[in-house]
Each structure stands twice: as C-alpha cells, then as structure tokens.
C-alpha cells in the first residue's frame, strides 16, 4: 500500500476536486437558472483534472524514481490514480446528486424537454441517478487512461 501512497493521495485529491467543482457549478447556477450554459462550462473541469495528474506524476517521479521516470512508469502511476478515482466515483456521484445538487436531474429533465432536445419519456429514462452512476463509472477509467497516456509523455524524464 505504501508503494502506491502517492497515487492514492492524488486519486483522493481528484475526487475532492470533483466535489468542489460540483459545488462551484451549483453556486454559479449551472444546475438550475443557467442550465443552458452547463454543457459549455462543465468542460473547464478538465483544467484542474489534468493538473492533478501532472502534479501526481511529478511527485511520483521526484519521490519514487529519484527525478527520472520512464513513460511506462508514469503511465502506470496514472493508471493507479485512475483506479482510485474510479473506485471513489460511486461515492462522489451519490454525494453530488443527493447532497450537493439534489434537484439537478429534475432540472435537466425539464430543460431537455422544454428546449425540444428530448421527448418527456426519453428525458425520464436518461436523467436518472442510475444512468449517471453508470456513465461516471464507465467515463472515469476512459478519461483517466487517456489523461495518463498523455500526461506520462510530458512528465517522463531520462536519467542524466
């Protein structure tokens, strides 16, 4: 476990950042009165998300690999961060939809129907806690693997 303490730490930081991001989105009104802008602004979460992977891999390189790290060592560390994030996803998704923004799914259903993007039945089926849980559990590893692959390219460093 100690061998992966850096990755576990950064996975937890990532999950906490995700929760903080949801609080900020809610406070900004992106889950109700400005829901029409949510699809644009929610993508900015990529900035702190990628930064967390960069910081995690840089710490791994410095502390565990004495300043040099191969692509594969960095990619593996990123995958472990991704595993931690994925394991925490059901909890963070539940906290988001039950505590932080319990009206989001209802608001999103209504917005989708009122804007003509979906029929009522379609929106009722799509905007459910179960569907969002599945999407996040599938999406977390996909995005984490992709992020790990790219960030490992930029954080690798050869021995001098």
Image (cartoon, rainbow, N blue to C red):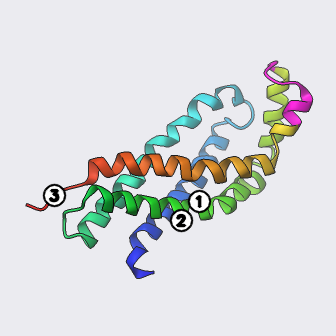
Report how far apart the C-alphas of labels 3 and 2 lie in the structure.
27 Å
Based on the picture, tell me whether residue 123 belongs to the magenta stretch: yes
Please report contact status of discs 1 and 2: CB closer than 8 Å, yes or no: yes
**Who's the residue at 53% across and 54% down the image?**
17
Front label number (3 vs 2): 3
Image: magenta residue range: 115-124
Q: Position of residue 62 (x, y in %)?
A: 24, 66
Q: Give the mark nearer the N terminus: 3 vs 2.
A: 2
**Who's the residue at 53% across and 65% down the image?**
84
Nearer to me, 149 or 33: 149
In the picture as drawn, the residue positioned furthest to the right comes out as 121
Q: Is residue 11 above or below residue 144?
A: below
> Tag 1, which secondary structure?
helix
Q: Which mark is residue 86?
A: 1
Q: Residues within 10 Å of mark 1 (few under 14, many from 20)?
A: many
Q: Quadrant of residue 70?
A: bottom left
Q: Which mark is residue 84?
A: 2
Q: Left of 29 or right of it: where is 117?
A: right
Q: Position of residue 98 (x, y in %)?
A: 78, 55
Q: Position of residue 60 (x, y in %)?
A: 31, 66
Q: Quadrant of residue 5?
A: bottom left
Nearer to me, 32 or 72: 72
**Who's the residue at 69% across and 55% down the image?**
93
Which residue has dot 3 on it? 158
> Tag 3, which secondary structure?
loop
């Amino acid at each position: 476990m100690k061998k992966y303490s850096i990755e576990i730490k950064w996975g937890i930081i990532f999950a906490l950042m995700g929760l903080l991001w949801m609080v900020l989105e809610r406070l900004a009104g992106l889950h109700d009165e400005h829901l029409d802008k949510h699809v644009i602004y929610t993508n900015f979460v990529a900035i702190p998300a990628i930064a967390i992977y960069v910081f995690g891999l840089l710490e791994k390189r410095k502390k565990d690999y004495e300043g040099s790290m191969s692509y594969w060592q960095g990619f593996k560390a990123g995958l472990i961060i991704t595993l931690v994030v994925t394991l925490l996803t059901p909890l963070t998704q539940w906290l988001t939809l039950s505590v932080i923004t319990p009206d989001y799914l209802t608001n999103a259903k209504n917005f989708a129907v009122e804007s003509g993007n979906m029929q009522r039945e379609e929106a009722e089926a799509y905007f459910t806690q179960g569907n969002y849980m599945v999407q996040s559990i599938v999406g977390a590893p996909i995005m984490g693997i992709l992020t790990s692959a790219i960030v490992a390219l930029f954080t690798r460093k050869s021995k001098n």
